Amino acid sequence: MRSPAELDVRPVTSARWKDLCTLFGAQGACGGCWCMWARLPRAQYASGLGATNKRRLHALVKSGTPPGLLGYLRGEPVAWCSLAPRESFERLERSRVMKPVDEQPVWSIVCLMVRKDMRGKGFSRAMIEGAAAFAKKHGATIVEAYPTEPGAKRMADTFAWMGLASAYRAAGFEEVARRSKTRPVLRRAL
């Protein structure tokens, strides 16, 4: 078994684009999303599923501002985390569940993905820790997340695309709001 301590977390740059494509696979991580769900209005996101959303994410990567982080295990990409200042994610502003808690500036984690064969080994927490460190390095004082808390009911992995609340709590996040039974708003001060 490999240790989460071995995970090397790096920002996605143009040089790492092929690694992100390898991790996401032909389906773009989940049905052509290419991690654009939170960044676009619903209609624009839906009309771009697949190749268009892939081009959009690639344009973000080429712009020089990393849209997220890759986790490498012995040089192989095994995990992804999308984070940025909250205002980068248009969809959050319109969400009843994920609307702003207050006026404080936050960075938001909107996607957390670990390759299927690596799940359940602590890599989510390692990615969350890497995201917090990256955000702090770039001036953030608070990181916010909107994970799933399924309770006793088992859910399909695809529905946990923002991660599980237990991994965030293990990384020092605390609940600051709950507008949905299964999706708390969690924060960590940096």
Image (cartoon, rainbow, N blue to C red):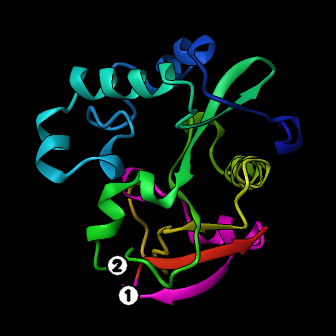
Q: Which residue is mark 1?
A: 179
Pick the residue in front: 82 or 2. Answer: 82
- Residue pictured at 45% horizontal, 27% vertical: 24
Pick the residue in front: 180 or 190. Answer: 190
Q: Secondary structure at mark 1?
A: loop
- Residue pictured at 34% horizontal, 78% vertical: 97
Q: Is residue 176 magenta?
A: yes
Pick the residue in front: 123 or 162. Answer: 162
Q: Magenta region: which residues? A: 158-181
**Image height check: is 155 above or below 13?**
below
Residue 100, percent across and down?
43, 78
Left or right: 30 in relation to 68 = left
Disc 1: CA contacts within 10 A as few (<14), some (14-19) or many (>=20): few
Q: Mark on residue 14?
A: none
Pick the residue in front: 44 or 27. Answer: 44
- Residue pictured at 65% horizontal, 38% vertical: 118
Residue 134, percent across and down?
74, 46
Asked if the residues shown at circle 1 and circle 2 are in contact, with their CB atoms under 8 angstroms apart, the answer is yes
Q: Residue flagged by tag 2: what amino acid is it?
A: Val
Residue 32, percent across and down?
27, 31
Q: Residue flagged by tag 1: what amino acid is it?
A: Arg
- Residue pictured at 48% horizontal, 57% vertical: 162
Left or right: 43 in relation to 153 = left
Real-space Cα separation, disc 1 to disc 2, in angstroms: 5 Å
**Image height check: is 110 above or below 25?**
below
Residue 175, percent across and down?
61, 85
Left or right: 131 in relation to 182 = right
Q: Which residue is mark 2?
A: 97
Upstream in sequence: badge 1 or badge 2: 2
Disc 2: CA contacts within 10 A as few (<14), some (14-19) or many (>=20): some
